[in-house]
Image (spheres, helix red, strand yellow):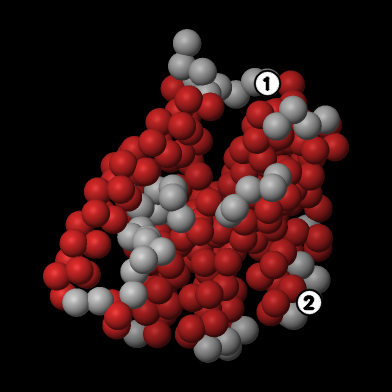
Amino acid sequence: MYATFDLIGVVLNGIIGGTIARQRDYDAVGFVFLALFSALGGGMLRDVLMQRGTAAAIADSRYLLLAIAGALLALVINFKGRAWEIFKVNGDAIVLGVWSVTGAVKALNFDMPLTSAVFMGVLTAVGGGMIRDICTGQVPGIFGGGPLYAVPALVASISMVTFSNFGFYALGMVVSPILGAGLAIVAYWRGWVLFRNSEWAPVNMTAAQVAALVRRSERRGFIRGRRSKRKIGGDFDLG
């Protein structure tokens, strides 16, 4: 089952990379490379850092072929509309949960520390999107302003590592991706974002100042989250 979802995720993220290339008015080369970065970047970063043989995306030709297939689909089909947005968001969330768990499990299988396994799980899930955003001149979306994405990956990874550490490996493989995917889906549709404020420095502030700043930031964060959601929806013509 995991292998199937893994390959489906490669195709889906290849398509997502291709749709971004279309929005940027890139040529076919841009479509292919953004698809490759989106679909394979996280796993390749993980495998390079772990230094345990050839990266899976290179060793298994299916990964490259499916990522390119996603790019070609996005090149010949203009994915847009409400139905596509719903499919993309929910499908990507499911893939995020699966990739977080597979990354953590791979690290555990190589007897890496628990903290390293968690990091590898998160990196597997979000690394490709980070590379894609950087290549298009954008600040990576997980750095703030958008609905929670890295946090669900972190939750799924910690869950898997915890279950495994207490001997419930199989249960963790089932529960952890559901937790990650569920949180990502709810966060997107509810517009949940992490607290952020450049003025935040509690050591230098009084309790009243901290409380007031938190309230203002929460209001701004909620508004940013709703705007981000509307913007994503606006990228895909609902008409």
Q: Secondary structure at mark 2?
A: loop
215 with respect to 233 (left or right): left
Task: Tell me what residue is drawn at x 53 percent, y 27 percent.
Answer: 235
Q: Residues within 10 Å of mark 1 (few under 14, many from 20)?
A: few
Q: Nearer the viewer, residue 192 or 184?
A: 192
Q: Is residue 237 above or below residue 119?
A: above
Q: Nearer the viewer, residue 199 or 48?
A: 199
238 with respect to 40 (left or right): left
Q: Residues within 10 Å of mark 2 (few under 14, many from 20)?
A: few
Task: Name the residue furthest left.
Answer: 208
Q: Secondary structure at mark 1?
A: loop
Residue underneath mark 1: 77
The amino acid marked with disc number 2 is Gly
Q: CA distance from mark 2 to mark 1?
A: 37 Å
Earlier in the chain: of badge 2 and badge 1, it is 2
151 with respect to 222 (left or right): right
Task: Tell me what residue is drawn at x 44 percent, y 48 percent.
Answer: 146
Task: Tell me what residue is drawn at x 62 percent, y 38 percent.
Answer: 16
Residue underneath mark 2: 53
The amino acid marked with disc number 1 is Ile
Task: Tell me what residue is drawn at x 40 percent, y 73 percent.
Answer: 158
- Give how far across and how far down residue 2 sits, in percent: 53, 56
Any part of residue 99 in sight: no
Q: Nearer the viewer, residue 201 or 75?
A: 201
Query: Which picture quadrant has residue 154?
Result: bottom left
Q: Is residue 35 above or below residue 174?
A: above
- Give how far across and how far down residue 6 sits, in percent: 59, 53
- Give how far across and how far down residue 87 sits, in percent: 47, 32
Q: Nearer the viewer, residue 16 or 8?
A: 16
Q: Is residue 189 above or below residue 220?
A: above
Task: Name the residue furthest top.
Answer: 239
Any part of residue 198 in sight: yes
